[in-house]
Image (cartoon, coloured by chain):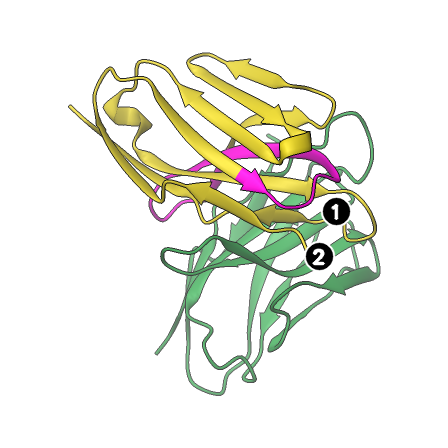
Chain colours: A green, B yellow
């Protein structure tokens, strides 16, 4: 089945550690996005990529890094520079062009600092 | 910068009622608007997508309208059921160089049996 897979579902990070969240899609979509969701708030954009080997900062990119070496993969690294990383992280993808521009989301990764 | 607002933030209704959720956005230069549903601890499920040239879309008991010139969209849910209880989010896909989805903070709906 086509879709977006995020892993792991739950992730625990110690202070000072870098952790990487995985996002894979088999929808052949060009554009991929990472969002952060905090309780009672909407989704805030961290990074997005419209094509392989290119990505742009979103509204809250500080303390995060991404790569887009393959069309189907857009991993997010939460670095030790991110002071408040505990949140729910959502990955999305959509066709860059074409008649259907619907965005599809993964099931999310909940990151907790311990 | 695009800003999206959803009103009300929370809504509780008895089963069977028809209800309307509101979404407003500040920049009318959009490609489309999408309504999502989110269950607790889960990802987002797409409900309806309205292109900028369309005025409404329907799926089952759901009807979404779009008035791009006034920067407003509504999601109408007919004959609400307890299974409709969730958070409903609207997002706009802005045209121009930014080309990113901007979300509202959602409306948390509770349908009481």
Residue A72 visible in the displayed image = no
Residue at image coords 78%, 44%: A30
Magenta stretch encompasses residue B90: no
Residue A80 can be seen, yes or no: yes
Name the element at disc 1. strand
Q: Tell me residue A49's x, y (percent).
A: 75, 55
Disc 2 and disc 1 in contact, CB within 8 angstroms: yes
A59 left or right, relative to B62: right
Magenta residues, start to end: B24-45
Q: Which of marks 2 and 1 is nearer the N terminus?
A: 1
User: Residue A48 — which label?
Assistant: 2
Instruction: Name the residue that disc number 1 marks.
Output: A31
User: In terms of image quadrants, where is residue B77?
Assistant: top left
Q: Nearer the viewer, residue B4 or A23?
A: B4
Task: Quadrant for the C terminus of chain A, please.
Answer: bottom left
Residue A21, given in percent of the width and then of the height, sits at: 56, 63
* Residue B28 among those drawn in magenta: yes
Circle 1 marks a residue in which chain? A
* Nearer-the-camera pick, A10 or A98: A98
Name the outermost residue toward the left.
B113
């Amino acid at each position: 089945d086509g879709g977006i897979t995020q892993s792991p579902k739950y992730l625990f990070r110690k202070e000072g550690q870098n952790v990487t969240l995985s996002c894979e899609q088999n929808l052949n979509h060009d554009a991929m996005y990472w969002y952060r969701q905090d309780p009672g708030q909407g989704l805030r954009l961290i990074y997005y990529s419209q094509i392989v080997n290119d990505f742009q900062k979103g509204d809250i990119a500080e303390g995060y890094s991404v790569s887009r070496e393959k069309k189907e993969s857009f991993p997010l690294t939460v670095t030790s520079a991110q002071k408040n990383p505990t949140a729910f992280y959502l990955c999305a993808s959509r066709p860059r062009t074409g008649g259907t521009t619907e965005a599809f989301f993964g099931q999310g990764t909940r990151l907790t600092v311990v | 910068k695009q800003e999206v607002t959803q009103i009300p933030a929370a809504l509780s209704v008895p089963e069977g009622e028809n209800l309307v959720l509101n979404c407003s956005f500040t920049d009318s230069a959009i490609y489309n608007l999408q309504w999502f549903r989110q269950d607790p601890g889960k990802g987002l499920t797409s409900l309806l997508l309205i292109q900028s040239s369309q005025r409404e879309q329907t799926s089952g008991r759901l009807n979404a309208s779009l008035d791009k010139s006034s920067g407003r969209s509504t999601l109408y849910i007919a004959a609400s059921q307890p299974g409709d209880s969730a958070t409903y989010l609207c997002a706009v896909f802005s045209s121009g160089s930014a080309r990113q989805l901007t979300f509202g903070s959602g409306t948390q709906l509770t349908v009481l049996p």
